[in-house]
DNA sequence: GTTTAGGTTTAG
């Protein structure tokens, strides 16, 4: 998406177009051309009346002519506008107007043969992040950032939504709800797919909807309990004394991830739909309500966390499939983790097995064989190898002990759809799929290294291969899972001896990790001040937003705008809050720099808006206006956001200076905008992210509690980045599962080699000895 | 046109 900054003063756009978007000639607009950062300028030669599409969305079509290219045969193009932008443009655009469109979508024109215009048309809407600039008119659009839009225009809701306790028999309504239960679409016994969805909302009423469609894609794309949905035109009936929702003609749905703080992006098959600030607000409210009123901790699990005798939802990639018999079908999947129990292997005829043989072999010990039955077979057969799946309510069944490999675990997807049993295909765009892909890709390297040693082996018929991953993993388990980075010459000391000795001293130990605290790993991340040695919790995002709202109450001081070393733009949100937002772009030699090198300061922005800005700009500093100049916010807020790290300062040790102190840095030849440098000139003592954990170690002589205090060395994961990276969180969880595998007997736990030191802590009343882990890191093959 | 399913685990 393009970045289009329209400078707005008193509501009138008067800025030239940003330098990085480039004009594109009509004859260069071709299907497949990347139109990001391109704009098209043309003159209106024809406009059609404003109309409404079947779903009520405004639609406006005009024809633009590119007069600069009079020599080309085709010099005009259709422009299709949707939603609010259509309505607005229809009011101000007239014949002969010359204007600019950016952020358009180039789509093959179905009417090119008849109207003789360009063989593509341009589609624009606010939802798509488009912007229209008409000379001399107020801006119709937006100050638009890479992936979000600050809209200047207010949008009145077109649809009325009924809360779930107000539903009446025989009506057709629009509604919102949080998914409490769902059955992923399955093949019904009739002609359609069916999906059953139970919704709840803050009225505390519940509605079960039975949705049918011949088109799988038009059923709601619900991936988990807690997702938020918007249904349009759903029919309400009474059934067995309760209200029931059922699809009616024109049924349409949007689905949103229900996790607080994740991007609000609708999942839908509808080509055109209303999606405005109203929707965003409603989804936020429902997310917040659900977070405190709905238990959404589903039965999701990784293979490494599978418990026998339980049902769970598995997110995985399909690597093989095979027909087994008339009532069952085999899916071979993996999720990058290893089930801690022996798992079954379903034998199938070689010719029935689909999938890449090399990969199936390579991953054989990380693969779960899932047998699916009856009604699920049809869907299972149609799945594409390589696709990402969520298989709901898989049964992890304890196998019979008389089997030759003892008691193994079997995976069944039983027939029927009770408890939402079924299979859903996740799109590549799904954040969890992205995460999984990244994760699987990062594993591939290790696997392929292992494969080098067996590359000469025949890959066919290798069920008893000696050089498989299983034995590799077993070898790993005999080697220590943590190693020393120093002090190799030291001898081990047993824990009892250490506990009976005086502090301070240093020891090398060999022990097992019996348990650790906190179990919720994100709780182990703290902020540490190396100056006063204080530790504190990482502020929750919500607190920070609250602080921002407080600072936004003070109106921005326009006297501080556009100083010698920065340019400023301000605008007001058109929602009820009428929030004023100012962005100050720091210049170098009086020129704006490339966004990736630019530091921006923002007044009145929300946390989410700032995160978006960090994707585009080098650094973001939240600021507020005072009479004397721009200042940092209270130190409960970060003083800097950069990449995916939020930097905080120590309240005790910092003496914040005015923002103007940054200007010498901006004047440097090539400002590096290093966080430490920024902190220093702003008088901030930066806090460092650190993992703080308590390990209970045992070695057969005594248990000993040792603290881990680690910036990044132990886990080889920067503590500063883990809170914003699901991938790193998953990696850390896997590491902990290797160090201390759940459900394992003490004998079967792996050994850790650690370097620890004891130290004294004394106060008036007591004296205690503590232990801390040093110079130790997770072994290379564990990471 | 208005079936299909209408939540609450298979039993392989």
Image: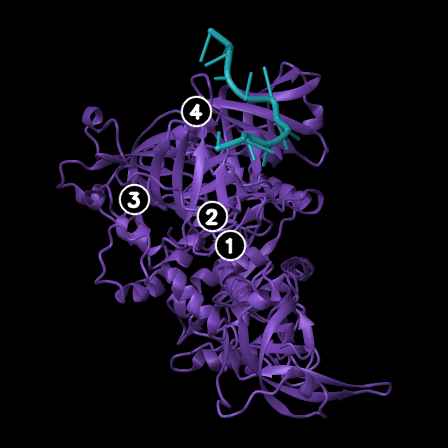
Chain colours: A purple, B cyan
Instruction: Determine which residue is flagged by label 3.
Output: A355
Res. A783 in view:
no
Judge from the rendering whether residue A501 lies leftward or rightward of residue A730; answer left or right: right
1 or 4: tag closer to the N-terminus: 4
The reply to whether the C-beta atoms of the residues labelled 2 and 1 are less than 8 Å apart is no
Q: Quick check: do tags 1 and 4 share a chain?
A: yes
Instruction: Specify the label residue A53 is tagged with.
Output: 4
Closer to the camera: disc 1 or disc 4? 1
Q: Residue furthest right?
A: A765
Relative to A40, residue A734 above or below: below
Closer to the camera: disc 4 or disc 3? 3
Which residue is nearer to you in this view: A599 or A352? A352
Q: CA distance from mark 2 to mark 1?
A: 55 Å
Instruction: Specify the label residue A142 is tagged with.
Output: 2
Count neighbours of disc 3 (C-alpha within 10 A) and say few if under 14, some if 14 to 19, many if 20 or more.
Answer: some
Q: CA distance from mark 1 to mark 3?
A: 25 Å
Res. A235 in view:
yes
Instruction: Determine which residue is flagged by label 1.
Output: A341
Residue A698, image x and y in percent? 64, 75
Chain at numbered mark 3: A
Residue at image position (33%, 31%) is: A62
Picture quarter with the C terminus of chain A: bottom left
- The quadrant holding residue A296 is top right
């Amino acid at each position: 998406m393009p970045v289009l900054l329209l400078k707005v003063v008193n509501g009138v756009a008067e800025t030239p177009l940003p330098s990085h978007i480039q004009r594109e000639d009509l004859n260069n607009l071709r299907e497949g051309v990347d139109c990001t950062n391109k704009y098209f300028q043309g003159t209106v030669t024809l406009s059609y009346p404003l109309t409404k599409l079947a779903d009520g969305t405004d639609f406006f079509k005009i024809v633009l002519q590119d007069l600069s290219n009079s020599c080309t045969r085709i010099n005009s193009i259709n422009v299709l506008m949707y939603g609010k932008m259509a309505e607005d443009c229809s009011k101000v655009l007239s014949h002969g107007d010359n204007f600019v469109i950016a952020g358009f979508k180039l789509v093959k024109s179905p009417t090119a043969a008849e109207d003789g215009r360009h063989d593509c048309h341009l589609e624009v809407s606010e939802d798509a992040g488009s912007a229209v600039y008409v000379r001399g008119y107020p801006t119709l659009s937006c100050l638009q950032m890479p992936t979000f839009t600050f809209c200047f225009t207010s949008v009145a809701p077109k649809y009325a939504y009924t809360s779930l306790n107000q539903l009446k028999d025989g009506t057709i309504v629009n509604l919102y709800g949080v998914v409490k239960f769902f059955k992923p679409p399955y093949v019904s016994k009739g002609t359609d797919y069916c999906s059953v969805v139970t919704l709840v909302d803050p009225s505390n009423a519940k509605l079960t909807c039975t949705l049918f469609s011949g088109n799988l894609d038009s059923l709601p794309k619900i991936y988990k309990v807690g997702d938020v949905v918007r249904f349009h035109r759903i029919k309400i009936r009474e059934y067995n004394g309760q209200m029931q929702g059922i699809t009616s003609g024109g049924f349409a749905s949007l689905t949103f991830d229900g996790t607080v703080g994740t991007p609000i992006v609708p999942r839908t098959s509808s080509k055109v739909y209303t999606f405005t600030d109203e929707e965003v607000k409603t989804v936020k409210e429902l997310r917040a309500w659900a977070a405190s009123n709905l238990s959404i901790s589903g039965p999701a699990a990784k293979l490494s966390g599978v418990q026998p005798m339980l049902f769970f939802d598995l997110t995985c990639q399909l690597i093989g499939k095979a027909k087994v018999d008339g009532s069952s079908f085999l899916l071979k999947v993996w999720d990058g983790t290893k089930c801690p129990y022996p798992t079954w292997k379903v034998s199938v005829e070689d010719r029935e097995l689909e999938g890449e043989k090399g990969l199936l072999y390579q991953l054989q010990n990380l693969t779960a064989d899932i047998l699916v039955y009856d009604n699920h077979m049809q869907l299972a057969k149609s799945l594409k190898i390589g696709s990402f799946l969520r298989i709901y309510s898989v049964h992890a069944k304890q196998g019979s002990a008389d089997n030759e490999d003892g008691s193994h675990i079997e995976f069944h997807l039983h027939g029927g759809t009770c408890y939402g049993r079924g299979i859903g295909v996740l799109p590549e765009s799904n954040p969890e799929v992205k995460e999984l892909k990244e994760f699987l890709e990062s594993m591939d390297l290790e696997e392929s290294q292992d494969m080098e040693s067996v590359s000469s082996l025949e890959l066919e018929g290798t069920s008893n291969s000696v050089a498989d991953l299983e034995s590799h993993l077993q070898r790993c388990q005999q080697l220590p899972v943590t190693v020393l980075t120093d002090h190799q010459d030291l001898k081990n000391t047993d824990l009892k001896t250490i506990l009976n000795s005086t502090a301070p001293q240093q020891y090398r130990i060999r022990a097992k990790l019996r348990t650790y605290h906190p179990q919720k790993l994100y709780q182990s991340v703290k902020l540490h001040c190396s100056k006063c040695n204080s530790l504190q919790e990482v502020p929750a995002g919500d607190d920070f937003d609250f602080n921002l709202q407080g600072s936004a109450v003070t109106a921005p001081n326009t006297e501080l705008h556009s100083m010698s070393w920065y340019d400023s733009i301000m605008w007001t949100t058109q929602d009820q809050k009428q929030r004023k937002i100012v962005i100050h772009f720091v210049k170098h030699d009086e020129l704006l720099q490339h966004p990736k090198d630019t530091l921006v300061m923002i007044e009145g922005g929300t946390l989410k808006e700032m995160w978006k800005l960090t994707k585009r700009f080098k650094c973001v500093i939240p600021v507020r206006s005072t009479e004397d100049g721009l200042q940092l916010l209270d130190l409960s807020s970060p003083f800097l956001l950069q990449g995916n790290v939020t930097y905080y300062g120590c309240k005790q040790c910092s003496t914040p200076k005015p923002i103007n102190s940054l200007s010498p840095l901006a004047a440097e030849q090539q400002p590096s905008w290093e966080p430490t440098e920024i902190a220093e000139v702003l008088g901030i003592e930066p806090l460092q992210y650190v993992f703080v954990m308590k390990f209970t170690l045992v070695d057969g002589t005594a248990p000993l509690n040792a603290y881990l205090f680690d910036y990044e060395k132990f886990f080889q994961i920067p503590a500063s980045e883990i809170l914003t990276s699901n991938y790193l969180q998953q990696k850390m969880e896997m590491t902990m599962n290797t160090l201390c595998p759940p459900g394992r007997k003490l004998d079967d736990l792996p050994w850790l080699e650690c370097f620890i030191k004891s130290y004294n802590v004394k106060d008036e009343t007591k004296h205690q000895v503590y232990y801390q882990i040093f110079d130790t890191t997770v072994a290379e093959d564990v990471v």
